[in-house]
Amino acid sequence: MKITEEAKGTLINLLGEQGAESVRLFSAGGGCCGPQIGLSLESAQDTDKIKEVNGIQLAIDPQVEDLVKEVTLDKQGEQFVLLGLSNCC
């Protein structure tokens, strides 16, 4: 996984404002291509894999770990987007 510089700057600010330690990537329900990936500023779960990417601590749910290996977290406008996800629908 990669995090762009623009996303990194915003995440650092959000983490500081919220007093959060990490960004959590998790399964947010199913879709036609498998699990949908959610992002949140919440504590890691016991089973999460902890990684540091571009200075940001990530807590990654094992259910989505393989899905986000080649993904880039970017900020476009006011939204975060995950680039490189399979779009099979």
Image (tube, rainbow, N blue to C red):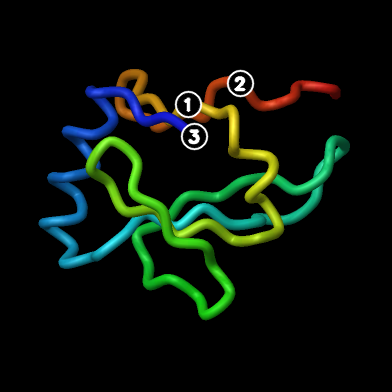
Residue 37 located left or right of residue 18 = right
The quarter of the picture where the C terminus appears is top right
Residue 84: assigned label: 2
In this rendered view, identify the residue nearer to me: 68 or 27.
68
Residue named by callout 3:
1
Q: Residue at x 49, y 34 (%)?
A: 1
Where is residue 74 shown, x and y percent of the image? Answer: 39, 25
Q: Is residue 20 above or below residue 40?
A: below
User: Disc count in the image?
Assistant: 3
Q: Tell me the tag on residue 72.
A: 1
Q: Amino acid at mark 2?
A: Gly
Which of pointers 3 and 1 lies earlier in the amino acid sequence? 3
| Cα–Cα span, label 1 and label 2 | 7 Å
Task: Tell which circle, 1 or 2, labels the residue nearer the N-terminal end.
Answer: 1
Tell me if residue 16 comes above or below residue 7 in the rendering: below
Residue 40: horizontal and vertical position, in percent? 42, 56
Residue 66, image quadrant: top right
Q: What residue is drawn where x is 31% and y is 28%?
A: 78
Examine the rendered structure and indicate whether residue 63 appears above or below residue 81: below
